Amino acid sequence: MVMAALLVVVGILRMNTVNQAKKQAERTSETLIQEYARGVKDLRLTVAVIEENRMSLYGYGEDGALFGSVESEVSASSGEEGGSPAPSLYDDYEIGSLTKVFVGELFGKYASEGRISLSDPASRYVDFGGKYDPTILELLTHTSAYEDYRTNSFIQMAKYRLNRNPYKGISSERVPVFMRRFSTGEAAPYAYSFSNFGYAVLGNIVESIEGRPFKNVMEDYIRTELELPDTAFMLEPELEKAWKWEADDAFLPAAGLTSDINDLARYVTLYFDGNATEGRLLAASEEKSAGGGASVGLGWGIRQDGVLGHGGETSRYSSQILMDREKQTAVIVLSNRTASHDISVSDIADLLYLEFFGE
């Protein structure tokens, strides 16, 4: 009797596994979005599918209902004001860790101009007095051995869960203190380990190179060289439940930017063949292993098939970019939600890219 019961249970489990696999195989990007959006009344999900200089934009709202779509050329301005009560294809979103690819590109520019060497130790730019001294390349590629949350605490995690910025008020002046306290008994090279604090250190290095606050340097670069009018650090954002920042916060380089779908579409086309500067080529080049067959450049992740990618997440917002420089194709997904029903914007972007551009 016991054996029979066990066989019944095993049979049910196998059936459930088969059904789940079948369900996964039958998913489309539309059904995945609907599942992600199910029961989320105030959802805003914006998608861009880009091929060369053409893009298709789609906006999804409550329960995954499509509220708008546009076919157009990628341009420097959207021609439509976001932030209105009604959902807009051009609304602003926090982009979280996507901020890091902008920082990586800036360092690619510095290196291509000979202003720095990627092998320079942090101590050349930050006077912290510690023994452990990672290089700029190690910081950019998350192979510095620094932990993800160098200042992690129960209070910080509670703030994150309550939609409050856990990094607000940690000034750039405190970065050398945290660097001085860090030590590692292991020998280099260090394995890939995602580190927000590593990018806080990079912010201090930018301030040393430029002699002015990181926020000002980055925003000037975004406006004048990238020509992205709607990408900025919003210290007092109008976005619902967005993080508040202070101008000298150390973690702005890790997760501080907001943007919209049109600016990010414009940004990825700057990486396409024929448009990429030497600094961008350097930022998008394989530098270190990230494990699992993937590599990492200066901020960008690099899949085995050569597709560049990066995502971002705050307490409330999430984002994902996938792009192929040579094929000049890209998918961008922005949401005012993090994972929902065990589905992330990364899952949605992966399936969209496969449907439109997969072989």
Image: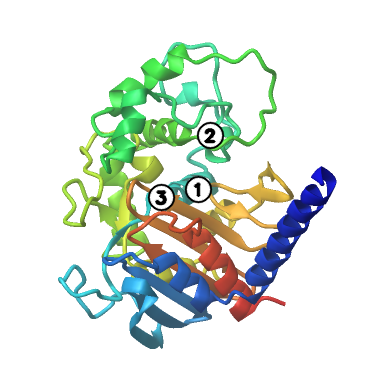
Residue at image location 35% in from the left, 36% down from the top: 251
Within 10 angstroms of label 3, few (less than 14), some, or many (20 or more) residues?
many
- Which amino acid does the dot numbered 2 rest on? Leu
Query: Disc 1 to disc 2, how far (Cα)?
Result: 19 Å
> Which residue is located at x 36 percent, y 73 percent?
63
Residue type at mark 3? Glu
- Residue 113: image x %, image y %? 50, 48
Occupied quadrant, residue 158? top left
Q: Residue at x 73, y 65 (%)?
A: 18
- The residue shown at (40%, 18%) is 178
Q: Secondary structure at mark 3?
A: strand
The percent coordinates of residue 118 (x first, y second) are 57, 37
Query: Which residue position is annotated with label 1?
Result: 113
Question: Residue 139: which numbered mark, if any?
Answer: 2
Q: Which mark is residue 313?
A: 3
Q: Nearer the viewer, residue 29 or 293?
A: 29
State which mark lies toward you, 1 or 2.
2
Q: CA distance from mark 1 to mark 3?
A: 32 Å
Camera-side mark, 3 or 2: 3
